[in-house]
Image (tube, rainbow, N blue to C red):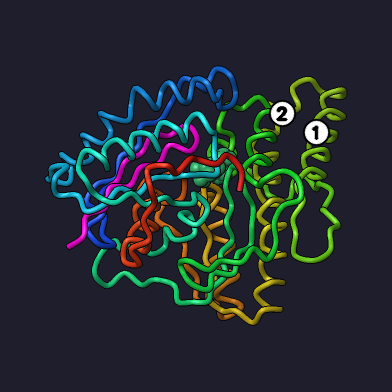
Amino acid sequence: MTYILGIETSCDDTSASILENEHVRANLIANQNVHEIYGGVVPELASRAHQQSIVPVVDLALKQAGLTARDLDAIAFTRGPGLLGSLLVGTSFAKAMGMALNIPLIEVNHLDAHILSHFIKENDDSKVPDFPHLCLLVSGGHTQIVLVKSPFDMEVIGRTIDDAVGEAFDKSAKIMDLGYPGGPIIDRLAKEGNPNAFKFAEPRISGYNYSFSGLKTSILYLIRDNLKKDPDFIEKNKNDLCASIQHAIVKILMQKLCLVAKDLNIKTVTIAGGVSANSAMRNVFSETGKKLGWTTFIPPLQYTTDNASMIAIAGYFKYLNKDFCGLDVVPFARS
Ligand code: KG4
Ligand code: ZN
């Protein structure tokens, strides 16, 4: 049995997880509500909140797993990309704990971890993707189509040239003054709306890359023009607006994913990252997969948004390879 402690502090969630091989023994997340009133993450406040939460969250994870720190075999932590001040908290904590326990440290790339979240086993017969497979990584900071050849060999085939898809959700919600983070709110309101009520400009970008800035502008103009005619336009059409925006975003995501899968002749396809929690995204992805004969993998909701179990599973692969890092390792903000 190998016990890995995973630590994730790249943005505004302090998370600790303990894996027994590929199985989750504990997965704790302390959310930071302090950012809500600012309508976005305030980096300085995020690092302070990580400082407050990291010790109790790790302590609770050990208790929930029924283990003590001495039972751990290694500590995996997010090295980047993310907010530097936030990453420094997790990295420094991992170093100190690793040194005190005299166990190896494993640095993990946050994006690789989202992609590898599919290898966390819920039970003994959990199916995992084979290699190579395609992953559509959709989060608050990234939008990528990745060819996953092995846990250590991933090639980005397409990426966004401007906004990430999570930003497209969050910025749309901001235009409508719905709250932060906007993705889950749009998802909820869209359930009562008509996805074909409003049409927005579609990106015209060749190849495998994405662009979301045109869509954002199109949403902004449509709302601005209609508000001139009716000041209650947003309130009256909230659900239809959310459903239409969500529909447009999912359509853009799926078009390029289908193109890459066809060109590369890959039939095993996964989605990962915060936006893979979106209910329309999950439905359309799974329906498209059925139609095209793909084997699809959708992460359980708790492993879509940032969590430390994905860091621990990525760490577990590296542990098996004895791929450890030294105490001189430093976090990085950008990939
Ligand atoms: O992966 P994640 O937790 O953090 C990053 O690595 O960026 O993704 C956060 C993003 C946010 O933009 C949030 O609005 C979006 O994921 N998100 C959703 C949903 N849940 C989270 N977007 C659409 N629908 C959801 N249900
Ligand atoms: Zn993430």
**Dot 2: within a 10 Å radius of its alpha carbon, few (fewer than 14), some, or many (20 or more) residues?**
some
Query: What type is the residue that disc 1 sits on?
Result: Leu
Q: Nearer the viewer, residue 324 or 80?
A: 324
Query: What type is the residue that disc 2 sits on?
Result: Ile
The reply to whether the magenta stretch includes residue 4 is yes
Q: Nearer the viewer, residue 264 or 295?
A: 264
Residue plotted at (45% across, 77% down): 130
Q: Over which residues does the magenta segment extend?
A: 1-17
Residue where numbered disc 1 is placed: 220
On screen, residue 82 above or below 85: below
Q: Can the viewer see residue 8 in this picture?
A: yes
25 vs 144, left or right, is: left
Q: Are marks 2 and 1 in contact (CB under 8 Å)?
A: yes
Residue plotted at (21% across, 55% down): 3
The reply to whether the magenta stretch includes residue 271 is no
Residue where numbered disc 2 is placed: 175
Mark pair 2, 1: CA separation: 7 Å
Q: Nearer the viewer, residue 34 or 301?
A: 34
